[in-house]
């Protein structure tokens, strides 16, 4: 899966048209767009990855950690009103733990601050769980570990169908060195609707959002 379209539909109540959210690989040519979220402390607050202060650092980070990553995608939005086309506005990644033989993987994600609250991350993660178990052979469990204070991220996981498993006490070390409790969530291959009889890939994912000016 390099790109998945989400239906764009007008809400019946006349509210703005939905946003098309797509996923595709992120490359060196995306360095400028990558900077928009990777250099923003508001976005990176709960992430361990260092902030990108310069374009050169963005290029280096993409080269060293994205190119060659087992499953890393740019979250793109398509906004006809802005005429911006499909531009990366965030990232989502799945990293299989090597020592577990690939049956368990960690989910990570981030979105440009100006687009928070429009359901874009939820749509992207919903697409991930729909596809990634087919794309990474042997993967059975996707898990996400969130800082206890990152309630927005926890809400996104719940909306995408992840199950809250509990609190990991004094588990996360923030970039500042502060040690925090974490909340762990999981989504199993068997949690997919397709695992219970629906035909995979037939049902479109429909995302109703607000129009976006990137
Ligand atoms: C986490 C993140 C990806 C969410 O993206 P998003 O597109 O804004 O998420 P969505 O719009 O799909 O959903 C956000 C939900 O959080 C809710 N929310 C926002 N602030 C909240 C708060 N303070 N308390 C509780 N819920 C909150 C919103 O209301 C919304 O839920 P709703 O649809 O039920 O109203 C984005 O905030 C981000 O990039 N954060 C920084 C990086 C990060 O923390 N990554 C995850 C590391 S584990």
Image (spheres, grey):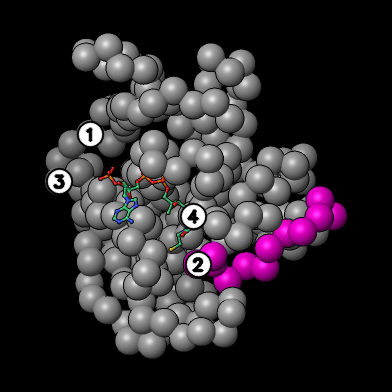
Q: Residue 109: which numbered mark, if any?
A: 4
Instruction: Left or right? Give the position of 193 relative to 34.
Output: left
Instruction: Left or right? Give the position of 65 relative to 81.
Output: right
Say whether disc 4 or disc 2 marks the residue closer to the N-terminus. 2
Q: Residues within 10 Å of mark 3 (few under 14, many from 20)?
A: few
Marks 2/1: CA distance? Answer: 37 Å
Badges 2 and 3: C-beta atoms under 8 Å apart? Answer: no
Say whether disc 4 or disc 1 marks the residue closer to the N-terminus. 4
Query: Residue at point 46% right, 86% down?
Result: 179
**Element carrying mark 1:** loop
Query: Residue at point 39% right, 36% down?
Result: 118
Identify the main secondary structure in magenta.
loop
Say whether disc 2 or disc 1 marks the residue closer to the N-terminus. 2
Instruction: Work out whether 8 lies above or below 193.
Output: above
Instruction: Work out whether 69 lies above or below 83.
Output: below
Q: Residue 199: which numbered mark, if any?
A: 1
């Amino acid at each position: 899966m390099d790109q998945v379209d989400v239906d764009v539909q007008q809400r019946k109540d006349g509210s703005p048209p939905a946003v098309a959210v797509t996923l595709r690989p992120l490359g060196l040519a995306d360095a400028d767009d990558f900077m928009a979220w990777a250099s923003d402390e508001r976005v990176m607050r709960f992430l361990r990855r260092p902030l990108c202060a310069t374009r050169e650092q963005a290029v280096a980070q993409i080269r060293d950690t994205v190119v060659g990553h087992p499953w890393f995608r740019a979250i793109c939005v398509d906004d006809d009103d802005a005429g911006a086309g499909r531009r990366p506005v965030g990232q989502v990644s799945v990293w299989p733990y090597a020592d577990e033989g690939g049956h368990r993987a960690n989910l990570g994600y981030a979105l440009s601050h100006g687009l928070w609250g429009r359901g874009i991350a939820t749509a992207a993660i919903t697409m991930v769980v729909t596809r990634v178990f087919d794309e990474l052979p042997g993967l059975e469990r996707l898990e996400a570990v969130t800082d206890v204070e990152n309630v927005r991220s926890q809400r996104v996981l719940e909306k995408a169908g992840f199950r809250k498993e509990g609190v990991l006490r004094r588990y996360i070390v923030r970039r500042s060195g502060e040690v925090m409790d974490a909340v762990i969530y999981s989504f199993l291959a068997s949690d997919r609707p397709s695992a219970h009889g629906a035909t995979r890939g037939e049902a479109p994912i429909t995302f109703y959002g607000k129009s976006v000016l990137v």
